[in-house]
Each structure stands twice: as structure tokens, then as C-alpha cells.
Amino acid sequence: MRSTRSRARPGEGEKLREEILLAAEALLVETGSDGALTLRAVAARAGVTTPSVYLHFANRDDLLEAVCLRSWGELERRMREHAEGVDDPLRVLGRCGRGYATFALEHPVQYRVLLMRPSAHRSPGARACFRYVTEAAAACVSAGIMRGRPESLAVGLWSALHGLVSLLIAQPEFDWPDDLDTLIDNVVRMAGFGTVLASRIPREATPASAQLAEGLDALTASWPERDQPRR
Amino acid sequence: MRSTRSRARPGEGEKLREEILLAAEALLVETGSDGALTLRAVAARAGVTTPSVYLHFANRDDLLEAVCLRSWGELERRMREHAEGVDDPLRVLGRCGRGYATFALEHPVQYRVLLMRPSAHRSPGARACFRYVTEAAAACVSAGIMRGRPESLAVGLWSALHGLVSLLIAQPEFDWPDDLDTLIDNVVRMAGFGTVLASRIPREATPASAQLAEGLDALTASWPERDQPRR
DNA sequence: GCGTCAAGTTGACGGTGTCAAGTCGGCTCT
DNA sequence: AGAGCCGACTTGACACCGTCAACTTGACGC
């Protein structure tokens, strides 16, 4: 197999690693499936023979993980961007949620791989993302809007968003509403408001529906007049 | 390959289908991974040669799906059981959520396969489950506790639960709290209360955190006295 | 110019899903 | 009772996969 690529010079072996990662990512995005990421296809695309991949990656799994791990950093950046300049801590969470969802839908393959590996929690990028959300939840607690351990609150928020985008990615043919942005918005609102409310209703007091509705009627009746941020 | 199994009599070919399904399910449960479900392993376990599987299943995917599809019915039964005898429509949803979560955690492999196939929404069992949740949401709307399309509300609730159990299944090594039941409970409460609250706060009125906190303080202060169902 | 050693290749192995063709054996019909 | 049919299953093969041990190549330092 006379390859197109010219052999790297001693000391520059790392170049191939980068080329393989690029080839693998392109393959992943083009096919939209991690099953198509065969070592042979990746190697061919990088202009190299199959076993050469083993010079830089322990096995196929290692390669797949390396490709996707890069996305964590971008996810965190996306969330920070979305929340930039927002003061209200609850709104910060809302913006993070929307950023999270749009990022996941733009990189469905990477997202799936990332969150399905049992090792995800060990990745520094993942920890950073989770810490960011936890801090945003902590800000809500500090502001008196939520109660409880920020980590627990963050897990709940993360769950809701992860569930939504997982379903959107895995079940594209489901009868989703036309307006995905509104759907995402609804779930973000549900998760945010739900965390606020659930963390404030004592566990022992589970108000019955009628009572809850009655109280919320009184509570929400006055809001449209008092707060119209015209979002 | 002289097999242990004796050849079925004409007209009884369907027997093998059942034996293959049983063997496949056992293999799935024992190994805890759908990757271990190779045609050769399944066939050997059923006491038959590999290509015989093709007499009853189009391919490996088809077999895997057939094995897991059976779980939908059990999931629906589980939710109905949990909600049995409960009147308050919001509590019905809460019970459903807990049933859903425990079922998923008890059948992690099947759950993963079921919800990750793009064809899930076409399965009658899946549609029945979704309809059941939608009806429970519709009951909340009828009772005046929630507002909006029941389907949209159901999607939100489903998302939250699916996200939680997906993370629990896929990231077993994450630093989860010791008490999983409480975690599930928190997410169920978040989803339930969140759907109620978000569906009642008009989209144009997004109360700032301080205002929301103030209103909820007033609202929830009186609850512990008025409702103590000692759950 | 030449040996060295990293960088990359060759060729092979066992395992996988899948298929075309063959074989077996109980049932029916004469 | 024997012939023959046809459904149930097996045989044998193919292409592809991840992976590894052994081999070759070629740029650099001396």
C-alpha cells in the first residue's frame, strides 16, 4: 500500500495523531453514526494503513472517545456564551439550558458517544461543564430562589435537558412539534421553575392539585402586569 | 453440527422463534450488554446453527428489537400499577414517574435498546405508554392544575425521567447520591411541579428570581399546616 | 557513507453478520 | 407400504471487522 501521505520525520509522529483525529471526526459527522467509524475507513481517509492507528490510540474505543472528548470544551463555551451578560441567576440557568440543547442537536453523534460512555464523568471537560451548571444553581440558592444542595439541583436540571435532547436525537421520526425552539423552551422553563418550586415545597407537604392550583392562580395572576421583559 | 434440539415438525416452525427470543433475552440479561448478543451465541444457546436465526428474524437488529419490544407492555403495566387507586391527577403523574424510573433501572439493557432505536415511536407498546402519560397529563389539565396541550406536557415529563434514568444507567460510576430513591423523587417532583408552574406562567411574563421567590414564599408558607399527608 | 531507530507496512488470525445451496425427515397420497 | 414433497434446518463460504507480531523504510546524527 503505497500511501499518498509522506512519512513524518522522526519526532513528528504526533502529526499523524492529529490527522487521524481529523479524519475520524469528518467520518463521524458525514455518516452521522459512530458505527461507521471503522479503523480501516479512518486509516484510509488519513492516507495510512490500518494498524498505524495503533501507534497513537490503544484501540477503536480509545479513538472514538478521543474524537468526542473535544466537544466538552465547546459545550462549556457555548453555555457560557449564552449566559453572558445575564444577571438574574434563574435566567442564567435558562440560557445555559438552551445553549446545551442547541449544542447537542448540532453535534448529535458526539453528544451520544460522550454521554453514553461510562467514563464520561472522569473527563475533565465533563467535570467542568457540570461544575459550571452547579455554580449557576448555587447562585440561585444564594439568591434565595432555590433551596438544597446545588449538586442535586444541577443533576435535576441536567437530567431534564439530557432527556429531551436524547429523545430528539434518538427518535427523529417521532411526531415532534414543528417548533423545536418552543419545545426546548418549554422543557427549560419546566426544569427551571420546577427546581425552584420543588426545592421550596417541603417534602412532607405535598399539596393536592386543587390546593396547588388555587395558590398558583393567586400567585401568577399579578405577574403579567408586574413583569413584562418582552423577551 | 449435530444439535441437541430435535427438529420441529412441519407447521411448528414458530417454536424456534420463541426459543431464540428466550435465549437472546437470557443472554442480554446475563451479560448486561447488547454487544454480547451475537447471532452465534444466541443460536448456540438455542441449540441450533447460526443461519437458522434468519428463518425468523431478518437480521441481528431485528432480533434485538424483537427481544426488547416485549418490555413496553411491562412498562405500561408497571406505571398503571403504581398509579392504581390514586385520585389526585398530579399524584398519578408522580407515581407513574416513579414506576417508570424503577422499571428502567431494573431493565437497563432493554431500556437503552428500546429508547435508542429510531423506530421506537412506531411500536404499539411505546405508543400505548405515551398515550397513558398523555392521558394522565390531560387529567391534570381538566382538573385545572396544568394548562396547554397534554402531548406537550407529557413530552416534558417524559424527557425529565428519561434523562435521569439514562444518566443513571450510562454513568454508573458518577458520584450519585447514596439514596437513589430520593434522587428519583426529586426529579419527579421537579418535573411535576415544573410542568404545573411553567404551564401557568404566561410565556410573556418571565418573573425575575427575586419576584418569583417572594411570591413562592407567600404561597408555600401556609402549606405544611394545611396538608400533611404523611407520605 | 552508515548504522540507528522512530514511523509506518505486511500479512495474518479469530470473530462477526449474512447468504446461497444443500440435506434431512416427517407428512401425505397413492 | 413406498414415493415424493416440502418445510425445517445445516453446510460452507464470503466480506468485513478489530487486533497483533514481524518486517521494511527512510531521515537523521556521527
Image (spheres, coloured by chain):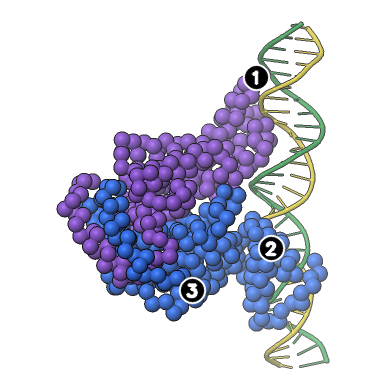
Chain colours: A purple, B blue, C yellow, D green
Q: Nearer the viewer, residue A163 or B212?
A: B212
Identity, as a three-letter code, of the amino acid under mark 2: Glu
> Which residue is most to the front?
B225
Q: Quadrant of residue A6?
A: top right
The reply to whether dot 1 and dot 2 touch (C-beta < 8 Å) is no
Mark 1 → mark 2, Cα distance in angstroms = 47 Å
Tell which of A5 and A141 is nearer to you. A141
* Location of mark 2 (residue): B30
Badge nearest the viewer, 1 or 2: 2
Whether residue B15 sits left or right of residue A136 in the image: it is right
Q: Residue at x 31, y 42 (%)?
A: A88
Q: Is residue B22 above or below residue B115?
A: below
Horizontal side, residue B119 vs residue A97: left or right: right
Image-quadrant location for residue A120: top right
Give residue B218's mark.
none
| Residue C1 screen position, x and y as percent | 78, 7
Q: Position of residue B22 (x, y in %)?
A: 66, 71
The residue under label 3 is B82
Identify which amino acid the numbered label 3 is placed on.
His
Placement of A136 over or under B164, stated as above or below: above
Residue at 34% across / 49% down in the picture? A145
Can residue A52 be seen?
no
